[in-house]
Amino acid sequence: MADVHEIASGMPHVTKWERDDGTDRPVYQVGGKSFVFFRTPRPDAVDPETGEKYDDVIMIWVESEDEKLALVSDESTPFFTTPHFDGHPSVLIRGSQLGEISKQELTEIIQDAWLSRASNRRATTWLKEHRLS
């Protein structure tokens, strides 16, 4: 989970919104738009064997439905979705499964999440500095 916090907070113009319920489940935003969101346990993400709500789900925005489908359809990754997020440009991942992807892949996914929510000016500036767009 530390990698998620490090990567998300390292993007420019990021605000970290802390919940006032005493939990460590921040929301990372750019320009008032969330791009990484640590969810509270919800009935739409449960262990299929025990029925217990997952308490470590992270929601990450994606650029498009195609990108979402690519990530959740790839059985080699731990990304998933639930019916609650049908039509929503985001994927879910459990914090306990972050080790199943490389830090580089996690970095790219969070950077893409930031890009999908940042203003055009901020995104263009960042891309010019980091990716030769």
Image (cartoon, helix red, strand yellow):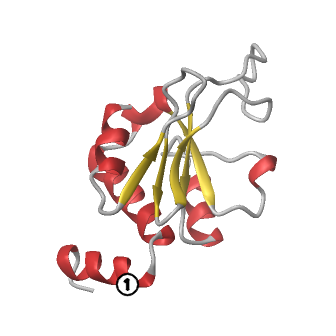
Left/right of residue 133 with respect to residue 24 in the rendered view: left
Q: In which quarter of the image is residue 73?
A: bottom right
Q: Quadrant of residue 68?
A: bottom right
Image vertical order of residue 103 relative to residue 113, above or below: above
Image vertical order of residue 1 relative to residue 58, above or below: above
Q: Give the residue at x 61% y 36%.
A: 39
Q: Where is residue 54 in the image (x, y as percent from the top left)?
A: 65, 24
Q: Give amino acid for label 1.
A: Arg
Total labels: the figure holds 1
Q: Where is residue 6 in the image (x, y as percent from the top left)?
A: 29, 42
Image vertical order of residue 9 relative to residue 42, above or below: below
Q: Which of 18 and 67 is in front in this view?
A: 18
Q: In which quarter of the image is the C terminus?
A: bottom left
Q: Give the residue at x 71% y 61%.
A: 88
Q: Position of residue 86 (x, y in %)?
A: 78, 57
Q: Give the residue at x 33% y 83%.
A: 124
Q: Nearer the viewer, residue 78 or 3?
A: 3
Left/right of residue 131 with respect to residue 43 in the rendered view: left
SS at mark 1? helix
- Name the residue that disc number 1 marks: 121
Q: Give the residue at x 41% y 57%.
A: 109
Q: Position of residue 111 (x, y in %)?
A: 36, 61
